């Protein structure tokens, strides 16, 4: 498990230990959830949507450090964004997580997730909350899941 040491960079450790926006959002008008059965991660994302803007966002969940830290980072980075902006950020993050490519300095704290790409089994842990957030913001009732459904 020594290889995982690099993965748990200080940002990830910090967000896992003190997750930001970790609460049920009383004013939420959209909710999205996701689970990653392979690791046991569960995330529920609460979004207060005003027009097409994510006025507020929070999450609750349980699971590994990567999944919880990624969710915390997600709330910090998507709060105040429009759905379109959130989709663009999420697309960059998905690329970052799967390839380790840091797009530019704007990604700042999100670049902590770049190390995840070295551990394919953990990619789903990191992307889970982003899928759940987009599903919530776009008002899709179906829960996000990293697993294909049977239908
Ligand atoms: Zn996990």
Image (tube, rainbow, N blue to C red):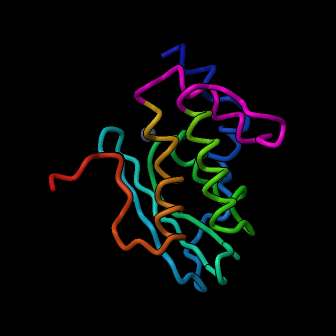
16 or 49: nearer the eye?
A: 49
Above or below for 57 versus 132: below
Q: Is residue 103 magenta?
A: yes
Q: Nearer the viewer, residue 11 or 117?
A: 117
Q: Position of residue 135 (x, y in %)?
A: 46, 64
Q: Residue furthest right?
A: 105
Q: Quadrant of ligand 1?
A: top left
Position in image of residue 70 (x %, y %): 59, 46
Residue 116 drawn at (x, y percent):
56, 28
Q: Residue at x 65, y 54 (%)?
A: 19
Question: Which residues fall within the magenta stretch?
Answer: 98-121
Residue 115, placed above or below residue 133: above
Q: In front: 4, or 114?
A: 114
Farthest residue, direction top: 2
Quarter of the image with the C terminus in it = bottom left
Give above or below for 78 relative to 96: below
Q: Position of residue 129 (x, y in %)?
A: 51, 53
Q: Does 77 appear in magenta?
A: no
Residue drawn 58% across the image and 52% down it: 71
> Looking at the magenta stretch, what is its main secondary structure?
helix
Residue 108 located left or right of residue 41: right
Residue under the point 50% across and 70% down: 138
> Where on the picture, by quarter, is residue 43?
bottom left
Please tell me which residue is depicted at 54% across the width and 39% down the height of the picture.
66
On the rendered structure, is 139 left or right of 35?
Answer: right
| Vertical position of residue 83 compared to residue 109: above or below | below
Q: Quadrant of residue 109?
A: top right
Q: Nearer the viewer, residue 31 or 15?
A: 31
Left or right for 72, reference 134: right
């Amino acid at each position: 498990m020594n290889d995982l040491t690099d993965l748990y960079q200080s940002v990830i450790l910090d967000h896992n230990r003190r997750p930001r926006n970790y609460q049920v959002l009383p004013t939420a008008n959209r909710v999205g959830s996701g689970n990653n059965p392979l690791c046991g991660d569960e995330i529920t994302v609460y979004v207060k949507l005003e027009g097409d803007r994510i006025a507020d966002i929070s999450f609750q969940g349980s699971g590994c450090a990567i999944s919880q830290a990624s969710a915390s980072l997600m709330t910090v980075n998507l709060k105040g964004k429009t759905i379109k902006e959130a989709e663009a950020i999420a697309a960059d993050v998905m690329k970052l997580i799967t390839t380790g490519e840091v797009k530019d300095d704007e990604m700042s704290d999100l670049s902590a997730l770049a190390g995840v790409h070295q551990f394919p089994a953990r990619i789903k842990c990191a992307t889970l909350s982003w899928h759940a957030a987009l599903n919530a913001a776009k008002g899709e009732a179906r829960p996000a899941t990293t697993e294909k459904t049977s239908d």
